[in-house]
Image: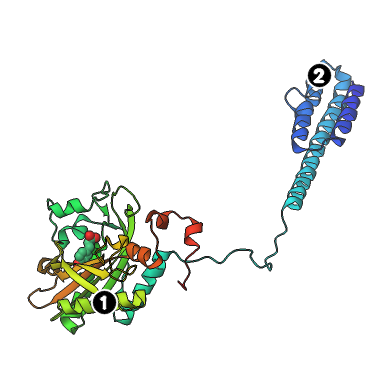
């Protein structure tokens, strides 16, 4: 029987020498020391061995099993090491000191216009505020003099969340929080409230070249004693002339928004035809750009400000529209497309 042990040993040593992969090794392991393996069979054969041979046979088989197990473990490590070496050799050389072969990126046109507007308003003493994209019904509507059943809600097809909050449909939604944040400094220290708050807005719009469900606005407010429509016109005209780097003609038309009284649509003279009339301005010579108005007394009250003592103006500039006009983007969907072909064309120098 010890001859059988020797045969098994010899065949194992031969087989393991030609094993080249971890998978092959596993097969070999099953073949020899698995449940029905050759070495296992030898151990099972113990019971048939005459008593006087049992001891030496048992020792030989046990020694064989230990040897087989040891050699398998050794081989597995050797093969794994080889596999890692091969993988490493296949990896491209990485040299941290090599200059990146990448084209310089560029800012999104809306970011460019937004930053430009922020700089201009900052230079006129306005604070730049950031505000949440998820707001309450109170912030978006009620505090802006738009109660639950007001028809003005229909103009903004709003995305409501299951918890009753909503995706802000206009940047005006931050007005109430801004008044509350700055009212003490206004009342106690006589510091006017001057803030702009750009942000992403959402409406359930059918998309086409002029409409998107996600767009950017920049709201601005100024509140102090004796603020009038002429202050509003001055700030808007200054901002637009800076953005377009030329003197811009503006006009105000009446417009209705529940949170301003009086409310206006601010138009600028068409930049494409210089006011002569062309297809871009529907031959009127004017482009609608920025609704605005004098803040409604109820809105000031909701923000903790006495409308008998203070007045203010507010505007909601369409940043997306401004970017389209400034950079001649004809289809609004290009701006949200993430297409580098489109977006690559804009740089700080534009
Ligand atoms: N929030 C309005 C909208 O998106 C725009 C607007 C109109 C904002 C008049 C204002 C304003 O601040 O005074 O439709």
Q: Is mark 1 within 8 Å of ligand 1?
A: no
Task: Find residue 13 and report its horizontal and vertical position in percent.
Answer: 88, 33
Marks 1 and 2, the one that precedes in the sequence: 2
Residue closest to the eye, 50 or 308: 308
- SS of the residue under disc 1: helix
Look at 32% across and 55% down and name the residue there: 210
Q: Single out the mark in the foreground, 1 or 2.
A: 1
Asked if residue 250 lies left or right of residue 333, the reply is left
Residue closest to the eye, 115 or 242: 242
| Image position of 125 with respect to 267: above or below | below
Residue that badge 1 annotates = 237
Look at 27% across and 49% down and name the residue there: 159
Q: Badge 1, how many Cα within 10 Å: few under 14, some, many 20+?
A: some
The quarter of the rendered structure image containing the N terminus is top right
As drawn, which residue projects farthest toward the bottom? 189
| Image position of 120 with respect to 283: above or below | below
Residue that badge 2 annotates = 45
Residue closest to the eye, 34 or 199: 199
Q: Is residue 177 visible?
A: no
Task: Find residue 234 and report its horizontal and vertical position in percent.
Answer: 23, 79
| Image position of 49 with respect to 345: above or below | above
């Amino acid at each position: 029987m010890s001859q059988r042990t020797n045969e098994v040993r010899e065949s194992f040593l031969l087989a393991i020498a030609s094993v080249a992969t971890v998978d092959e090794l596993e097969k070999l392991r099953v073949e020899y020391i698995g449940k029905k393996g050759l070495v296992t069979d030898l151990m099972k054969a113990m019971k048939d061995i005459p008593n006087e041979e049992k001891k030496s046979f048992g020792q030989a088989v046990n020694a064989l099993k230990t040897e087989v197990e040891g050699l398998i473990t050794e081989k597995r490590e050797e093969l794994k090491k080889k596999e890692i070496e091969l993988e490493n050799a296949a990896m491209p050389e990485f040299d941290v000191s090599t200059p990146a072969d990448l084209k310089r990126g560029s800012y999104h046109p809306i970011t460019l216009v937004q930053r430009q507007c922020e700089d201009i308003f900052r230079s006129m003493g306005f604070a730049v505020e950031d505000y949440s994209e998820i707001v309450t019904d109170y912030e978006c509507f009620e505090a802006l003099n738009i109660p639950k059943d007001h028809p003005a809600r229909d103009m903004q097809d709003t995305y409501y969340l299951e918890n009753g909050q909503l995706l802000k449909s206009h940047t005006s939604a931050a007005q109430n929080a801004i008044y509350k944040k700055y009212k003490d400094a206004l009342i106690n220290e006589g510091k006017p409230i001057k803030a702009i708050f750009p942000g992403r807005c959402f409406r359930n719009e059918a998309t086409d070249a002029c409409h998107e469900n996600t767009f950017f606005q920049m709201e601005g407010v100024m509140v102090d004693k004796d603020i009038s429509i002429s202050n509003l016109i001055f700030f808007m005209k200054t901002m637009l002339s800076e953005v377009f780097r030329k003197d811009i003609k503006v006009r105000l038309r009446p417009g209705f928004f529940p949170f301003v009284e009086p409310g206006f649509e601010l138009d600028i003279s068409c930049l494409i035809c210089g006011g002569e009339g062309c297809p871009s301005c529907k031959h009127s010579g004017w482009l609608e750009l920025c609704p605005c108005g004098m803040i409604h007394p109820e809105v000031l009250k909701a923000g903790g400000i006495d409308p008998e003592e203070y007045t203010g103006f507010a505007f909601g500039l369409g940043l997306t529209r401004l970017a389209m006009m400034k950079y001649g983007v004809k289809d609004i969907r290009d701006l949200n497309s993430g297409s580098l072909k489109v977006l690559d064309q804009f740089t700080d120098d534009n």
